[in-house]
Image (tube, rainbow, N blue to C red):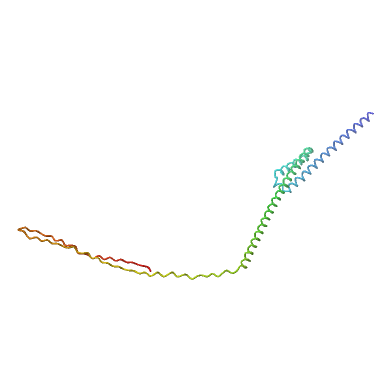
Amino acid sequence: MRSSKLLACASAIGLTLVSTSAMAEGKMDRARAAVAEARGKVDAAARAGTGGVAPRTLTDAQAALRAAEDDLKASRKDQAIVDAQNASRLADLALNETQRAQADKAAADKAAADAQAADAARAAADAEARARAAEAEAQAARNAPPPAPVIVAAPVPAPAPAPTETTVTTSTTTPVPASRTVVKRAPAKRVVKRTTVTKAAVPVAKTTTTVTTKTQ
């Protein structure tokens, strides 16, 4: 009876040890799997070019992966799983940011290409319209009647100046000399009187000339 009890206790202890060992092995496997998954995501994010779009997020993901690998080597299974999951989350975030940036760039490039194509189409349409207008103008010039000859009239000579008649009238005026009176008195005794004779000025002839011009 006693031996049966001891056997039962030993069996229970053995089962507990096996169960504990199996649990430990299972957690280690989960830690290894978590680290491997995180490593794959971080490498994929690095290859996708996230270093140029989200360098800080990629750097944090790589640091978390190194911490998970260190935990796994030290058999810190729980911490290794936590760090590996954090590395996976950061790698996904960096990859999403990169994909969004790439999509935005592709949309911007497409919009620029569309605008360039529209500009090229407008330029081609304008060139075609100008060519049609030039052709129409040339056709109209070919169909237009010849221009009328230009007649240059001879200059009209200036009229000859009208003849003029000039009349010259000359008149001469001679003034009449003034009369001169001399009074002589009989001499008195011993009385001498002097008589002064004033001669009039010699008359000067005055000539007046009048010129009359008449236009016929």
Residue lying at the far left in this picture: please name it.
Answer: 189
Count of marks overlaid on the render = 0
Query: Where residue 37 sits in the image (x, y, percent)?
Result: 79, 44
Query: Where residue 14 sits in the image (x, y, percent)?
Result: 88, 34
Is 14 on the left-hand or right-hand side of 117? Answer: right
Which quarter shows the N terminus?
Answer: top right
Residue lying at the far right in this picture: please name it.
Answer: 1
Name the residue nearer the viewer: 55 or 107: 107
105 versus 9 height, above or below = below
Query: In which image quadrant can residue 186 be found?
Result: bottom left
Is 38 on the left-hand or right-hand side of 151? Answer: right
Name the residue nearer the viewer: 129 or 23: 129
Query: In which image quadrant can residue 93 be found?
Result: top right
186 versus 87 height, above or below = below
Which quarter shows the C terminus?
Answer: bottom left
Query: In which image quadrant can residue 137 be found?
Result: bottom right
Query: Where residue 150 sits in the image (x, y, percent)?
Result: 54, 69
27 versus 203 height, above or below = above
Name the residue nearer the viewer: 52 or 11: 52
Name the residue nearer the viewer: 107 or 16: 107
